Amino acid sequence: MDNKKLVKSLICSLLALTVLISLGTWQLERLRWKTEIISSMNEKITLPLIEINTSVINNIKNYNYRSIKLNGYFLYDNQITIYSKILNGKVGRHLIIPFKTKFGNILINRGFVPEDYILDKDTEKEFKNVLITGRVKFQQKINYFTPKNNLLGNEWYYINLDEISTYFNISLNDFYLIEENNLNDKYPLGSQFIINIPNDHLQYAITWFSLAIVLSIFIHLLWRKNVN
C-alpha cells in the first residue's frame, strides 16, 4: 500500500476508533445515570406510608413513587379503561377513575379488571367517603409504538392528564395514583405498580469497547505490515 493510501486508511480507522471509544464512554455514563435513577426509585418505594397534606401537595414532585393515603370519594360517572393489559394470562384493562378530595381531583389507576368486568355505580357507593392508599406517579412519555389516545372513540392506551381532564371536563391535579390492593373486592386488582426500566448500558458499552479493541488490532497490523 502506498503512503497516501496508508495515511488515509489510518486516519479513517483512528476516527472510527475515536467514535467507538466515545460511544462506549457515553454508555458508561448512561449506566451510572440509570443506576442512580433505579436506586432512587427503589429507595422511595421502601419509605413508609404518609398521609397527604398541603405540604405534600405543594411539593408533590419530591414524592414520586411514594406511597400515600388520602380521603375522598370516587367520581364513578367519570371513568375510562386503558387497554390492553394482561395479568396471570387473563386479558383486561386498567380502570381509571377521578377521586375527589379537599386537595382537588386526583386521577386514580384502580388496577386490573377483566374485559367482562362491570362496575357497580349505585348512588350510595358513588358518594361514599373512603380512605385509599396509592403510589404517586407522573405522566410519562410514551414510546413510538404506543397508539395515540382516541378521545372521540373513548379508546385509551396511556394516561395523559390533559386529555383525560378534557374528556371528563373536570380539573385534575398534575399527578395520579396507582391504588394499592382493595382487599374488600376481587376487582379492581390494585398494586399494579411495576418498575420496568431497562438498564442494558453495560452490555452496550462492552460491545463498543470490544469493537474498539478489534479495530485497534487492525490498525496495529496495518501499521506493522506497511511500515516495517
Image: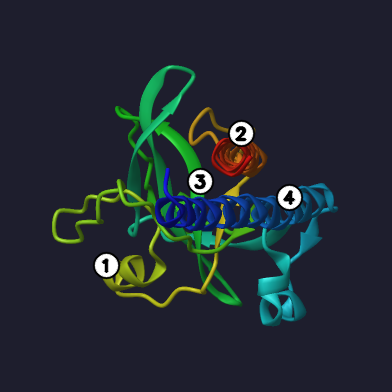
Residue at 72% from the left image edge and 58% from the top image edge: 68
Q: Residue at x 56, y 35 (%)?
A: 225
In this view, the mark in front (4 or 3): 4
Figure quadrant of residue 152: bottom left
Left or right of residue 80, residue 57 in this image: right
Which quarter of the figure has residue 219? Answer: top right
Q: Residue at x 48, y 63 (%)?
A: 139
Relative to 31, 95 lies left or right: left
Dot 4: few (<14), some (14–19), or many (≥20) neighbours within 10 Å?
some
Q: Tell me the amino acid under the disc marked 4.
A: Thr
Q: Percent x, y for residue 122?
A: 38, 48
Whole-Å distance between the Cαs marked 1 and 2?
30 Å
Mark 2 belongs to which amino acid? Asn
Tag in front: 4 or 1: 4
**Mark 2, secondary structure of its residue:** loop
Q: Secondary structure at mark 4?
A: helix
Query: Taking 115 as reference, is 38 above or below it?
Result: below
Which quadrant: the C terminus? top right
**Residue at the spot of label 2:** 184
Identify the residue position indicated by label 1 in the image: 167
Residue type at mark 1: give it.
Tyr
Badge 2 density bin: few <14, some 14–19, many ≥20, Cα 10 Å? few
Rate crowding at label 1 as few (under 14), some (14 to 19) or many (20 or more) other CA atoms within 10 Å. Answer: some
Contact? badges 3 and 2 (CB < 8 Å): no
Tell me the number on the disc at residue 110. Answer: 3
**Dot 3 and dot 1 residues touching (CB under 8 Å):** no
The amino acid type of the residue labelled 3 equals: Arg
Q: Secondary structure at mark 1?
A: helix
Question: How far apart are labels 3 and 2 at the CA level?
Answer: 13 Å
Residue at numbered disc 4: 35
Whichever of labels 3 and 1 marks the residue nearer the N terminus, that label is: 3
